Image (cartoon, helix red, strand yellow):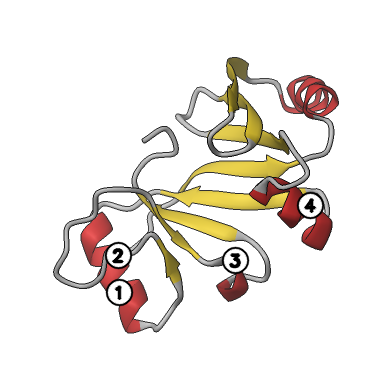
Amino acid sequence: MFNGIRGVFIRVNDIEHATEKYLKTFGGKLTQRHKFDDLGFDTSVIEYENDTFIEIISPLSDTSPVQKALDKFGEGVHLIAWNNDDPAQTVNQLRAMSLRLINDPGEGNPITQQIFIHPKELNGMMALVSGTPTD
């Protein structure tokens, strides 16, 4: 089903400070700084030579979903993006486990967007199981 971690998303209050700290501590290359106004968050992507990344996210407003997660869980791991060879099969296996999925189009329908395991299933952390983080 899963064959490794592609990347880790970390929610923070101060993206500038956190980006600087993660680069200094873990190295890597800052490959993206972008505000997603439609999604309500700011992001820094730090990539590594083994094709993995850390994405630091910070809310753009008090009503952002990231702000809601910060209020509820504090700073920390927000989401893990998992690699898998067959997203459709993986989603079917997760459905069979009766896990609550976000953006699941339902059995028999094509997967056309990112699919996540709901944070209530994973102790407050989401998991990206289908699609790439930049889809």
Is label 1 or label 3 in front?
Answer: 3
Residue 115 percent location from the top left of the image: 38, 56
Q: Residues within 10 Å of mark 3 (few under 14, many from 20)?
A: some
Q: Secondary structure at mark 2?
A: helix
Is label 1 or label 4 in front?
Answer: 4
Q: Residues within 10 Å of mark 1 (few under 14, many from 20)?
A: few
Horizontal side of residue 81 vs 30, given as left or right = left
Tag 2 and tag 4, C-beta contact below 8 Å: no
Q: Residue at x 71, y 33 (%)?
A: 60
Q: Amino acid at mark 4?
A: Leu
Residue 119: which disc? 3
| CA–CA distance in space, label 2 to label 1 | 5 Å
Tag 1 and tag 3, C-beta contact below 8 Å: no
Q: Amino acid at mark 1?
A: Gln
Q: Residue at x 53, y 67 (%)?
A: 118
Is label 2 or label 4 in front?
Answer: 4
Q: Amino acid at mark 2?
A: Thr
Q: Residues within 10 Å of mark 4 (few under 14, many from 20)?
A: some
| CA–CA distance in space, label 2 to label 3 | 17 Å
Tag 2 and tag 1, C-beta contact below 8 Å: yes
| CA–CA distance in space, label 1 to label 4 | 30 Å
Tag 1 and tag 4, C-beta contact below 8 Å: no
Q: Does label 1 or label 3 sit earlier along the sequence?
A: 1
Is label 2 or label 3 in front?
Answer: 3
Residue, disc 1: 93
| CA–CA distance in space, label 3 to label 4 | 13 Å
Residue 90: which disc? 2
Q: Is 76 located above or below residue 34 in the figure?
A: below
